[in-house]
Image (cartoon, helix red, strand yellow):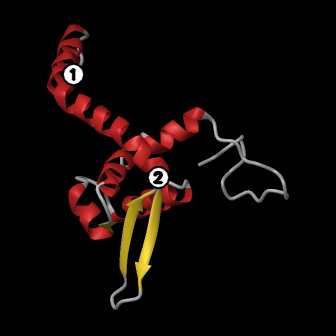
Amino acid sequence: MECAGVASDTPFTPGQARACTVREVLDRVGGKWSIGILVAASQGPVRFTELERQIEGISRRMLTLTLRNLERDGLLHRRVYPTVPPKVEYTATPIALELYESLVALTSWAERHRSTIAAARAAYDREHDRA
């Protein structure tokens, strides 16, 4: 995430804060894959492979990047167990749990209205000669 116009890999001098805009925060939590990950992790600890199965269409690389970004932003906690092979679980942090009900409401709204929106798109496209 880029905050205050500074790239995320840019070092800061002591005492310098990086302020994120509301848009930057919403872009992260409202990202294509973030909502599903946060909803799943809010139910309790979840493993990488469980997320991979639950989130239709996500690639391993994108799941890894999204998990890393959500952890970096303080929305997920990553716990590695010293086993062979290593067991890794992700859990929602308190701020992600606060966000949970809003995400569920948003996904429920999308589920309820997806066919209405699809019909509206088709009607618009017919009206505007789109193939």
Q: Is residue 64 left or right of residue 19?
A: left
| Residue 99 appears in the picture as rendered | yes
Where residue 107 sits: x, y (%)? Answer: 27, 36
Q: Considering the image in quadrants, where does the C terminus appear?
A: top left
Residue in the foreground of this view, choosing between 89 and 11: 89
Which amino acid is tagged 1?
Answer: Ile
Q: Single out the residue that lies furthest toward the top.
A: 127
Image height of 114 relative to 99, above or below: above
Give the image quarter of residue 82: bottom left
Q: CA distance from mark 1 to mark 2?
A: 33 Å
Element type where label 1 sits in the image: helix
Give the label on residue 17, or none: none
Image height of 49 relative to 19, above or below: below
Q: Residue at x 41, y 64 (%)?
A: 64
Residue in the foreground of this view, choosing between 23 and 74: 74
Q: Residue at x 54, y 40 (%)?
A: 25
Q: Residue at x 51, y 57 (%)?
A: 69
- Sequence-earlier tag: 1 or 2: 2
Where residue 112 sits: x, y (%)? Answer: 17, 28
Q: Residue at x 19, y 24 (%)?
A: 113
The residue identified by callout 1 is 117
The residue identified by callout 2 is 94
Which amino acid is tagged 2?
Answer: Pro
